[in-house]
Image (cartoon, rainbow, N blue to C red):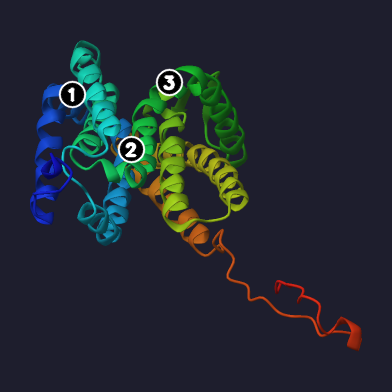
Amino acid sequence: MDYLRRSALPLWLRFFAWVGAAAVVSVVAAPASLALLSQEVNSNFGAVFPAIPLVALLLVVMTLRLGEFMKILAKEGGLGTEITTRLAGLVIITILLVARPLTNQTIEYSGVAIVLSVYATSLVINPLTKRIMLPYAAICAVGGGAPSLLQSAFGAPLANFTSDLSARLAAVAGFPVTWQGTQFQLLSKSGDIINGTVTSDCSGIVSVTAFLGLLALMHIDTKKNIRSTAEIAIVGIVILIIVNALRIVLLLWVGYVDGANVFWSTHDWIGYALFLGVYLSVLAVYSRIGSYRSSAPIVSLPSSSPSSSSSSPVPMHRE
């Protein structure tokens, strides 16, 4: 039975076997994912857009760590190794197959099912990758399911706050706009009357969730100080909320100057540009923060008397 403990698969074949199996399991576990994604893109691209930079950064990070991943694959044993881990992967796949009626309902559930399918397949075929894959799988799974939950819980309060902040900024700018809660009416220079509502979709919850997912990926990959990461997270959330209010005020200015058609056409893309700019700016600042692991040298203090010459050196970290 020793052959069960030895890996008979070449390294490249093991890698592509995992990729192929993950793709098959993903399609079987979430068969409606492509249709749901197409529907979401056509009807509400704004809900999908924040996932694009998250997926892009994930692919970059995984590409940079491909060498480490392949070294782990080189250590993989045969089918007789890591039995518990392989069985755990099979259990997850079984649960996903049973839960297909649920995962086929929304794009968020389908996304979570795909992430778990990839991770579970990795546990079955390449069990030694469980540690390197777990943080990324967890972030993607939470990033896929959290926005809808957070939006239902905090979307309305944040929409009210954003509306109030936008109304105050618009009053300072002097636009002829009237607000009633989250609803506004704007009179443009050309005489167009523009009516709009700041809904939960416009509250910025999805953009905040995407930002936190990007930050979490960078934290795991760069091993930054957890306190610095938390501070950047708080600052980034505040900036995104303010930028969202500024986005609405900018839209009001565009509608006031150029009318309803330009207002709505600008509404379809301006948020993507602004939020992406915030992501890149804040994460660029974060990348310059020192890592968690200090590389400070150890310096020995000189002894003050002959009697202390045999004492152990005292470590001192450079500030």
Quadrant (top left/top right/bottom left/bottom right) for the C terminus: bottom right
Residue 228's spot in the image, x, y percent?
Answer: 60, 53
Point out the tag, 1 or 2, that comes first from the N-terminus: 1
Query: For residue 129, what is the image quadrant?
Result: top left
Query: Residue sitting at 32 percent across and 47 percent down?
Result: 53
CA distance for labels 2 and 3: 19 Å
Q: Amino acid at mark 2?
A: Ala
Q: Secondary structure at mark 1?
A: helix
Query: Residue sitting at 46 percent across and 37 percent down?
Result: 208
Q: Secondary structure at mark 3?
A: helix
Question: How many labels were placed on the picture?
Answer: 3
Furthest-front residue in this view: 1
Furthest-bottom residue in this view: 306
Which residue has dot 2 on it?
137
Which residue has dot 1 on it?
36
Query: Residue sitting at 38 percent across and 33 percent down?
Result: 143
Which residue has dot 3 on it?
149
- Pointer 1 with pointer 2, Cβ within 8 A: no
Local crowd size for mark 3, using a 10 Å CA cut-off: few (<14), some (14–19), many (≥20): few
Q: Please say if 61 is above or below 123.
A: below
Q: Amino acid at mark 1?
A: Leu
